[in-house]
Image (cartoon, rainbow, N blue to C red):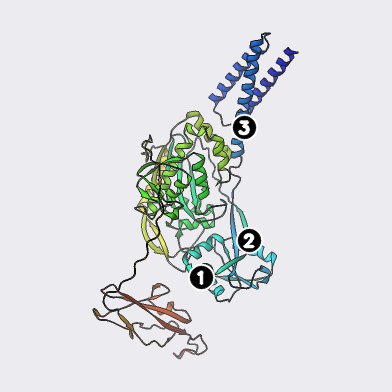
């Protein structure tokens, strides 16, 4: 009976060993040299167990039982880790869609609470918009008149004037409208949401262990669902040569003024490409850098915190000593040199720009430094201790089109050579400007005009990495003298200084009766205006219309217009005064404004 039990134990152990070795082989993540080592260990163990269990010797039998139990525990642990790994990687490349939320907005004080109560809805569209699909879904639910507008500003003006019942707009685009029109906050409410999911089609796979490849890392300015379209505040193009172990990080400022892929007319900020999906960002950067982008890796605020915390923090190099602002998610003092950061600290470090020399350019450098810290940690032996915790915490926190097979190949390559990687960073630069943009055409926005020399240099660096050249490392090989960021209690915003007046204010004078002109009539709007100042005498004011310099009355719209005269004297006293101009048509061609056209 005892001999039969020994045979059963031996058979079970042998079966589990064979099953485990087959399982490990088919995961395709363990290098051949480690597979051979595993086979040798298990064969020797199996032979030793045979002699321990099949000898009629009590002590040897007990040792055989103990070793069998230990092996079962080891195999169970290894099965668990491998299963967690496969479960994690099976999700790679499966979440390849973008999610847009189209909102039906009404005035906050309106009586509408359901889309069935609406008679019409306004909308705008462009080459990249999926709003027609949203309209189709809406029209399946209710019968409603769809009114198309060329500009969002005109549409919202009609909504406020109650000329239309509602508007349909994508959620992330609405945030841009609110950003440029602060007075709109609190004016509207959502009564219906239409969710549109579209598959992202980017297929440029390559052999990631033998051929250079490029990844677009996009950091979107939001928490929550990673599939939702949103502005991309982090734009880093990563070129990897797996043969030379060279990684090149190219940071592109969020406000870079570029032509969005698939659009005509105005250029736009790079960050706005994210409003139309990651494929638009990828195509735009491919055009800018004259290279193919094989994969994308998309994260948001939640993702970065989870990744860094799962790694038990990362060591990040800071070029400057500075204190982050409350707007970044936390107020921390970072020391020049290496800082060991947790998730919240790394996010704050990555988002700060206003307190750094160079603003957005310096923020891009910090973002690259965080990526360097993450790469160092995930390619170091330290990752083994928190392996399962890391994988579990990362589920659902990112979006990529890289397949599980690609990731498994990279892991197998790293385990095989345990090589360190040379990381080089480079940032595109430009000059400050103000331009109309594709996504917001009614008003000039701040943009960064590309410095073509830096663009050309970035293209050259990518070509060098692909060709197998090694670049100068941007970070220390050995990380020493690591500091811990210090929490700093946020200070209340200082009270604004009361404006002071020196001397007497200038006086702007003109006939304040509304000026009536014919549409497109050229009128000298300074001829009857006088500005007097006690200290400076006669001054000349500037004229603005809708916040822009006024140059030609043809920009005035039919109806009532308000222009503004502004003058500043030598004591820095500024005075403004508005003037009403009524534009009418000359239907009879007799030079007399037609009375039927709008008047004040």
* Distance (Cα) linking label 1 and label 2: 22 Å
Residue 314 placement: quadrant: top left
- The percent position of residue 375, horizontal first and vertical second, equals 46, 39
Q: Which residue is mark 1?
A: 153
Residue at point 62%, 32% (across, down)? 80
Quadrant where the N terminus is found in the figure: top right
The first of marks 1 and 2 along the sequence is 1
Q: Residue at x 69, y 68 (%)?
A: 142
Secondary structure at badge 1 equals helix
| SS type, badge 2 | strand
Q: Position of residue 215 (x, y in %)?
A: 49, 45
Picture residue at 45% right of the left edge, 31% below the top: 419
Could you say where residue 277 lies in the image, as x and y percent from the top left? 54, 54
Nearer to me, 69 or 383:
69
Disc 2: which residue: 194
Residue named by callout 3: 80
Badge 3: how crowded within 10 Å, few (<14), some, or many (20+)?
few
Say above or below: 253 vs 562.
above
């Amino acid at each position: 009976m005892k001999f039969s039990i020994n045979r059963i134990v031996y058979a079970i152990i042998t079966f589990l060993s064979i099953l485990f070795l087959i399982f490990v082989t088919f995961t395709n993540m363990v290098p051949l040299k480690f597979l051979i080592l595993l086979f040798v260990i298990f064969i020797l163990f199996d032979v030793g167990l045979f002699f321990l269990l099949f000898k009629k010797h009590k002590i040897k039998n007990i040792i055989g039982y103990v070793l069998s139990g230990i092996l079962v525990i080891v195999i169970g642990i290894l099965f668990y880790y491998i299963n967690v790994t496969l479960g994690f990687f099976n999700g790679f490349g499966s979440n390849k869609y973008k999610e847009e939320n189209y909102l039906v907005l009404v005035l906050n004080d309106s009586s509408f609470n359901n889309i069935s109560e609406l008679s019409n809805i306004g909308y705008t569209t462009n080459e990249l918009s999926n709003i027609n699909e949203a309209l189709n879904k809406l029209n399946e639910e209710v019968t409603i008149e769809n009114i198309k507008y060329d500009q969002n500003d005109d549409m919202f003006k009609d909504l406020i004037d109650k000329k239309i019942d509602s508007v349909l707009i994508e959620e992330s685009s609405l945030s841009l409208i609110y950003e440029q029109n602060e007075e709109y906050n609190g004016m509207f409410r959502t009564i219906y949401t239409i969710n549109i999911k579209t598959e992202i089609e980017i297929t440029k796979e390559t052999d990631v262990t033998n051929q250079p490849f490029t990844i677009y890392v996009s950091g979107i300015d939001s928490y929550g669902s990673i599939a939702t379209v949103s502005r991309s505040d982090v734009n880093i193009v990563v070129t990897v040569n797996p043969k030379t172990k060279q990684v090149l990080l190219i940071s592109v400022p969020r406000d870079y003024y570029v032509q969005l892929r698939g659009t005509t007319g105005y250029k736009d900020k790079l960050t706005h490409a994210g409003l139309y999906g990651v494929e638009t960002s990828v195509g735009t950067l491919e055009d800018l850098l004259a290279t193919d982008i094989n994969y994308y890796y998309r994260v948001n605020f939640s993702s970065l915190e989870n990744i860094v915390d799962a790694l038990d923090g990362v060591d990040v190099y800071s070029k400057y000593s500075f204190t982050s602002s409350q707007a970044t998610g936390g107020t921390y003092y970072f020391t020049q040199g290496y800082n060991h950061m947790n998730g919240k600290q790394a996010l704050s470090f990555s988002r700060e720009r206003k307190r750094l020399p160079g603003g957005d350019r310096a923020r891009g450098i910090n973002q690259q430094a965080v990526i360097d810290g993450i790469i160092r940690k995930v390619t170091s032996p330290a990752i083994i201790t928190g392996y399962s915790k890391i994988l579990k915490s990362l589920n659902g926190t990112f979006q990529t089109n890289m397949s599980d097979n690609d990731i498994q190949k990279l892991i197998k390559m790293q385990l095989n050579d345990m090589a360190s990687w040379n990381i080089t960073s480079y940032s595109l630069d430009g000059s400050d400007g103000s331009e109309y943009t594709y996504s917001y055409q009614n008003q000039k926005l701040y943009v960064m005009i590309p410095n073509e020399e830096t663009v050309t240099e970035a293209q050259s660096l990518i070509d060098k990495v692909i060709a197998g050249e090694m670049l100068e490392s941007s970070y220390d090989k050995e990380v020493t003298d690591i500091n811990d960021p210090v929490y700093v209690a946020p200070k209340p915003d200082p009270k604004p200084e009361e404006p002071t007046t020196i001397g007497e204010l200038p006086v702007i004078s003109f006939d304040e009766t509304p000026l009536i002109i014919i549409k497109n009539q050229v009128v000298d709007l300074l001829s009857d205006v006088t500005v007097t100042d006690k200290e400076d005498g006669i001054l000349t004011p500037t004229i603005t219309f809708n916040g822009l310099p006024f140059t030609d009355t043809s920009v005035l719209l039919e109806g009532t217009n308000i222009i503004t005269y502004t003058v500043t004297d030598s004591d820095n006293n500024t005075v403004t005064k508005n003037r009403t101009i009524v534009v009418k048509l000359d239907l009879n061609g007799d030079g007399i404004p037609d009375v039927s056209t709008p008047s004040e």
